[in-house]
Image: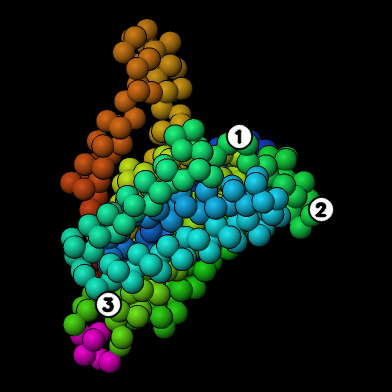
Amino acid sequence: MNRKIGYLIALAIALAAPFFAYPVFLMKLLCFGLFACAFNLLIGFTGLLSFGHAAFFGAAGYTAGYMLRDMGWPVELAILAGVGSGALIGFVMGTLAIRRSGIYFSMITLALAQMVYFAALRSPFTGGEDGLQGVPRGKLLGMVDLASDTTMYYLVLAIAIGGFALIMRTVHSPFGQVLKAIKENEPRAISLGYDVDKYKLTAFVLSAALAGLAGATKTVVLGFETLTDVHWTMSGLVILMTLVGGMGTLVGPILGAFIIITLENKLGDVGIFLARTTEIEWFNTLGESVGIVTGLIFVTCVLLFRRGIVGEIGAAFAAMGRKKAA
């Protein structure tokens, strides 16, 4: 009951948010929140550490942008094409990588993702280093003009809620319980008769498709796609979001994404404000030190909050409940 009330409060805040904050920034937060949740489905509930999720995120963005700008597809079909491209790359990458485990699995995903990066760099339709520019938003169902940021925000919110609901349903389904069993003790899951490779590949493709949904939606929102989204650093960024928020929790990756993206976009403004109020010139360079700040946050979470922010809060409440029961 408390969880349902919390979800309702979060929904009410999300519905009212575009009237109090910049809608484009809020849409960016939602896209990265969905991206982090997609990655968490793989690492948090299946135990597979992928270093290649930027490939799905960026490839879907390029696909959706190309279909919208050059092919003239409707926005809903362009986003679905992005999801399909992410799922297809995920199937190919997962088929090759799932045969290995541990660091070998991670390195294979990284190597394959770098192949996608160089393909995006060399392909003529991607724009190379200039990126895919001038992507129109189009009209939803041919009727609703998405040029308005507020209208676009509610579409992105619906997509993010749908993606989160799918992840939550997957985690609490019998399929999700098998994924948890594979994460906790893979040999025992095999001894119980489960085709572990099939389950891991399905989870990998589902995670890739949801990451593609986030990437395609982000391209529609911003109107461009660049090599940044398909670079390996984006895979590192989503890992950081998941670990900071809480790996293996449902809302932790969303919180982690909000914190990291807010730091990247607003840290410079905070530095300027501090410089003006304290008259310390060093704060003016705070915006250039985003990597240092996020690195410090990562180190702090690893040393002090091993479960992430949401994980530590949940563990604290569980400990209080056990103490009260005793």
Label 1 – label 2 distance at C-alpha: 24 Å
How many residues crowd mark 3 within 10 Å: few (<14), some (14–19), many (20+)? many
The image quarter containing residue 323 is bottom left
Q: Is residue 278 visible?
A: yes
Tell us which disc is closer to us: 1 or 2. 2
Query: Which residue is rendered at x = 18% and y = 46% of the image?
Result: 303
Q: Residues in magenta?
A: 188-193
Q: Position of residue 312 (x, y in %)?
A: 29, 55
Q: Nearer the viewer, residue 142 or 272?
A: 142
Q: What is the secondary structure assignment of the residue under circle 2?
A: loop
Q: Position of residue 199 (x, y in %)?
A: 35, 79
Identity of the amino acid at label 2? Met
Q: Position of residue 256 (x, y in %)?
A: 39, 47
Q: What is the secondary structure assignment of the residue under circle 3?
A: helix
Q: Is residue 153 visible?
A: no
- The numbered mark at residue 22 is 1
Label 3 – label 2 distance at C-alpha: 46 Å
- The numbered mark at residue 143 is 2
Residue to which mark 3 is pinned: 182
Quarter of the figure that contains the C terminus:
bottom left
Identity of the amino acid at label 3? Ile
